[in-house]
Image: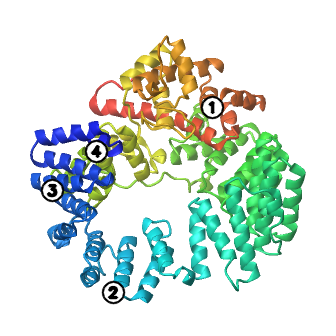
Amino acid sequence: MAQQLATMRTPEAYAGVAAYARRHTGETAAAAYLALGHAYLLDKQYTEAAANLAKARAAGDLLADFADFLGAQAQHGAGNDIGAETLLKGFAARYPDSIFVAQAPETEATVLLAMKDAAGARRVLEAAANGPGADRSGYQLAKAETAEALGDQAQAVGLYKAVLVAHPLSDEASKARAKLTELGAEETLTISELRSLADAYYRAHRYNLAGEQYRALTRKPDLPQAAKDGFEIAAAACDLKLKRLTVAEAEALPDSQDENGARRMYLLMELARDRNDLDQQQSIVSSMETRFGTSDWLAEALFSSGNMYMLRRDYPKAVTYYGYLAEHFPGSKNAAAAHWRAGWLSYRQGLYQDAARLFDDQITRYPSASETVAALYWRGRLYETQDHNPERAAANYRAIVRAYPHYFYAQMARKRLDGMQRVTPAAAPGLDRFKPMNVPALDASFPDDNEHLAKAKLLGNAGLNEYIPREIAADPDSASWSALAEAQIYASYGENFLALRSLKRALPYAASAQIPAIPLAYWRILFPQPYWETIKTESAKNHLDPYLVASLIRQESEFNPSVVSYANAWGLMQLLPSVGRKLAREEGMTRFATYQLLNPETNIRLGTRYLRQMLDRFDGVTEYALAAYNAGDNRVTDWQAAGPYSGMDEFVESIPFTQTREYVEAILRNIEMYREIDVAGSKKTGATGGN
């Protein structure tokens, strides 16, 4: 009920949690009242929030700091600043271990300012000047507001500017900018400060804001022409991202023999690519090579051009662009990817000597690049098929299995090694650098008397998810168990997708780890099995491997039954409403409505039927079916026609959509990992596996 209240805040949710609070006492009641107070606070019903947070404080002690801190915010919102100050005064002394200690001074200063006690606000902020919250944007904004209230406009302006520039994407930055405008001081922002602000918006993909800022910069008086040109072109780049830049507008941009001119030509090249004007695209890149041979914008144009020709299956041209980029811009962010693609597309053309050389270079020059795993594998295949050197091939395959045990290419390498059991791998010192990633020590148990963990569990019960990781991290000794503790709290109330996401963030190296290297409790959350009985039943009905279905769900929705994607795909197996209606008719379901796709049992019932259809469409080949599930069966038919392929490994690597290729590889990996985890669990408990 508390989770529903936190996300939906319906009258029914409020009533349910309120009834629960009245039926209980102690810390349980405190958590329920806290949930109510927090929800009312979000809804800006401050009087109700304050009343419920006061009840939370009276009911128990464990969450007292939450009740007081959030209660102060509610009292302030309700206009009772004396009540808010009562709760905030001496907060750090009362709750020295609270996660709100860093935030309390700025909140108290805000309350004191509302009470017209600017001197008191200054005292509070000065006392916290060396504390943990002094670098917070909220603290800096409170300092600026205090300086303004004390009549020191110069200091206030400087502080507002500092907030805006140092924390440009924060809510405090918006308030600081509004204050600068109000004070007539926005014009005092330097060109450098304004540019850093615009660049921050651009990097954050806030292209409308960035474009407005760049255009404002072009209107600055006494601006050097080169700087003005740069801002004008940067604004046009925002328009390109927003798909509203026209060719005429791009051609009208100032042309110059510097980075501004290079970026202008890059924009023109992208527009030519968008309209499939190959002659113009080639002409522009050629001109860039002549005029801007060392520009990073040329590197961007080369990579984009290579991608375009790869998708068009004009592999020779793609290799030319990728190869030029890798040769002339070896330090570029796209150099490793371009180098790999040049090698792979050479392989696809049957230029095996060129491919072998490029794969060898990739392994040597970019050992840590994600693409290098594929280079290791395909160089091994060439050792087998072209060099007739199975010993070197086996060495490559062994390196992959050793360093990347759960990657797609580790699966492929093990299959190759299974057919080479009498082959002794060659000595290959150059491959010694490929080693399993070190896994930090992880605990699967927690201290029984840990107060922060106890509070985190209550916060989970109250639906205050955003505070759970902060509360656990507040324990200085939690590093070895904090990730699992957080995930288990989410899993305990059925939010498996939150548990999964939290561990994926905490353990990004899991795909490179052997199963015994990480405690089983972590694996069970990373590869969960909710709805397992339904998955097994519907899989059996459709002659599917239940591990395949679970693996697909993990990739599609992370087991979030309520998710609706940007593409309007619904539920666990991400079905479009139109597909759901068709499948429901086939299943004999009457009066089907789209919302039923959010029911896990219904979604799995229809999704397994759809997966079966994809498998039947492609003669039971899992890789084809998965690619079709993600990208559509027509595309897969088109990709099949682009063959021939020497094996399924070659088809998968040839999928031109990176997202689809990685999707297929991930699900194949998931299946294997589910099986290994169940085997490990069976050995530990002596029970049979999940299947």
The percent coordinates of residue 571 (x first, y second) are 46, 31
Secondary structure found at label 4: helix
Mark found first going from the N terminus, 1 or 4: 4
Categorize mark 4 by other alpha carbons within 10 Å: few (<14), some (14-19), many (20+): many
Q: Are marks 1 and 4 in contact (CB under 8 Å)?
A: no
Q: CA distance from mark 1 to mark 3?
A: 55 Å
Q: Residue at x 33, y 29 (%)?
A: 682
SS category of the residue bearing label 1: helix
Q: Kindly identify which numbered label has been placed on residue 150.
A: 2
Quote the CA–CA distance across marks 3 and 2.
33 Å
Residue beneath disc 4: 489
Residue matched to label 1: 627
Please state which of the two labelled residues, at mark 4 or mark 2, is closer to the viewer.
Answer: 2
Q: Is residue 488 visible?
A: no
Mark 3 and mark 2 lie on one chain; the one further toward the N terminus is 3
Q: Quadrant of residue 115?
A: bottom left
Q: What's the amino acid at mark 4?
A: Ile
Which mark identifies residue 54? 3
Q: Is residue 368 visible?
A: yes
- Residue 379: x, y in percent? 69, 45
Camera-side mark, 3 or 2: 2
Closer to viewer: mark 1 or mark 3: 3
Amino acid type at image mark 3: Ala
Q: Mark 4 or mark 2: name the one nearer the start of the chain.
A: 2
Residue 508 vs residue 630, the one in the foreground: 630
Q: Is residue 224 left or right of residue 139?
A: right
Q: Is residue 394 above or below residue 78?
A: above
